[in-house]
Structures are given as C-alpha cells and as structure tokens.
Amino acid sequence: MPTLYLNNKVISFKQDQTILEMELAIEDHPLDDATPIIVRDYSRCIGCGRCLQACNEIQVNAAIRAPHGSRQDHPQGWYPLVDYEHCTHCGQCLQACPVGALFEKKAYGELIGNEARKIRTTCPYCGVGCQHWLHVKENKVIKVTGVEQAEPNYGRLCVKGRFGYDFIHSAERLTHPLIRDGEHFRKASWDEAPDLVAIKFRKIKEMHGHDALAGISCARSINEDAYNMQKLFRAVIGTNNIDHCARTCHAPTVAGLARSFGSGAMTNSFAEFAQSKLGLGSNFAHSWH
C-alpha cells in the first residue's frame, strides 16, 4: 500500500525524537497529543484532505470539519482539527494519511520504514470478520492496519480492531492451566487439566443428572468452536443447557429476523447495502459505526 509505505518513511525520519521533544520543536504548527492512541503532528500536514474524506465519507463520523471556501480564503493554511465529541477514535484518518502527520502513539519509534513483517488475520472481536494486517517485529505486534482490498471491511476498522491489541502481549494472560488447590491455584499441564474437568463432569452427571451441567459459549470464539461447544453438551453430556453470551443482547433481533425471513441471521452481505433501494427502521449514516 503506497500510503502506508510513505507514512512509515516519514515517521521514521523523525523517530529519534520523543513526542515531547516534537511538541517543543514545533512553533507555528499545533501538535494534538490529547488522546492515548493517536498523535496529530500538523507540521507535517499538507492539507490533502484524505483524513477528512476518511472520516466523513468512509466512516461517516463527521469528526473532522471541512474548510469553507477556497485555499485563498485560508492564507495561513488549514488544519484538519478534530471534534472529539464526534470522534470514535477508529483511526481511519490515520490509515489514510500519506505523510505521517497522523500516527499511532503506541507504535511511535518502534518501526523504521517497512522493517515489520505483515501477517494477515481476522479481527477477534465481533462477528463481522474484518481483515487485519498485523505489523510484527521480533514476534511482537507493533500496530494493526486494515486490509484495503479485502471483504468485508475494505480497510475500515473500529477503535477496538485497530488499537485493542495490547492483550496479546499482556503479562496477565494465562499461558498454562491453573487448578485450585485449597485457597490458591497451581500450575497444571495441558493433559492434567482436561482430565480433571472430565472427571468432575462425570461425577456431577452421575450424582445429579445431565441437566445439572450447563455451558456458555464465548462470542469471540469462531463458529466452529461454538458448534463444537453445543455438540459437546447436547451429544456427549446429553443436555440442552447450552447458551451463548450474545443471546441476551441480540435475542430481539434474532427473533425478529427468524419470524420475518426464516433465519435469525443476515440474508445479505455488507457489500450489498450499497445496491439496496430502501432501508426500513435504520439510518445507515448514523448506525454505520
């Protein structure tokens, strides 16, 4: 992607400076460092308007207001200042910037040019399936960008998809099973833990019946894992006590879709919205994000 390539080159040109040093060095141009995830260095801004289009026409957030009049009406230049009451911090403006005026605060100084290895993957949050580029250096995810020519997002990401990757390398992540031993937990092997769960489940079933067990599937799991979860409880354990954490918030929409169209899921893809003639009960511009 030419935009990201040039953006990385410009950022690497000043990467020996800290953000505080950048702010002290800028006299005639503002530096917006108000958010914990995006830095806006207007000394690099060329006024191309790409961030404006990304915000208003692609994400439809209307957080960057367009200048009125022609360039002659702004002899001192125009800065794409952000209205944070409307900004969702999706970072689409950042991906559109060709000169490095907008960049990720967490990734600043971590990369030089294109030294990162890009790995394509699917966003782990909601079920839309947005396509990611993970920019990896020394087995660590430095930043995330959207795959611009891939369905369903075509480069667009929300704030969680673009910036919510800190959990990957969190020191609080569990890297091995834990078994309660009195008031404490002890490390266990990947063979011991499932065997213990199977033994406990079998005892509960023998003492209280199969309906004494219930399972709740995670909304961040893939469809195949959710299917295996319900298969385990229905076919192996013999109970219908299986639920999904998204049911409570999506139950009305599932019931309405099933009654109207025979299925509790969408009958079309996101790309087909552009060809729709009529939308009922929804404002696409307001509900897009």
Image: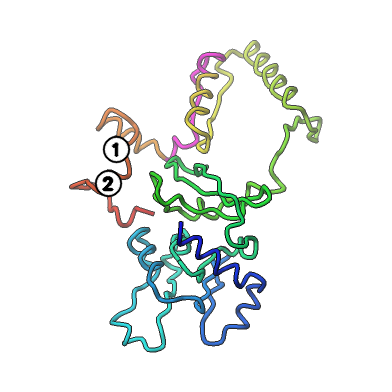
Q: Is residue 244 magenta?
A: yes
157 versus 264 height, above or below: below
Task: From the viewer's perspective, tell me whether residue 51 is left or right of residue 6.
Answer: left
From the image, tell me which residue sits under label 1.
268
Q: Is residue 58 magenta?
A: no
**Total marks in image:** 2
Res 263 quadrant in image:
top left
Q: Residue at x 59, y 13 (%)?
A: 209
Q: Residue furthest top?
A: 206
Q: Amino acid at mark 2?
A: Phe
Task: From the viewer's perspective, tell me whether residue 74 is left or right of residue 17.
Answer: left
Q: Residue at x 36, y 86 (%)?
A: 74
Secondary structure at numbered mark 2? helix
Q: Which mark is residue 273?
A: 2
- In depth, the one of 53 and 284 nearer the eye is 53
Task: Name the spot of residue 123 as percent of width and height, x first.
Answer: 50, 44
Task: From the viewer's perspective, tell me whether residue 156 is left or right of residue 167.
Answer: left
Decide which of tag 2 and tag 1 comes sooner along the chain: 1
How busy is the neighbourhood of tag 1: few (under 14 within 10 Å), some, or many (20 plus)?
Answer: few
Residues in magenta, as a range: 233-249
Answer whether labels 2 and 1 touch (C-beta < 8 Å). yes
Q: Residue at x 51, y 68 (%)?
A: 102
Q: Which mark is residue 248?
A: none
Q: Residue at x 52, y 81 (%)?
A: 30
Task: Name the spot of residue 232 as percent of width and height, x first.
Answer: 55, 19
Q: CA distance from mark 2 to mark 1?
A: 8 Å
Q: Amino acid at mark 1?
A: Asn
How busy is the neighbourhood of tag 2: few (under 14 within 10 Å), some, or many (20 plus)?
Answer: few
Task: Name the spot of residue 215 as percent of width and height, x first.
Answer: 55, 26
Task: Name the spot of residue 274 as percent of width and height, x first.
Answer: 26, 49
Quadrant of the snapshot with the C terminus? bottom left
- In depth, the one of 67 and 183 nearer the eye is 67
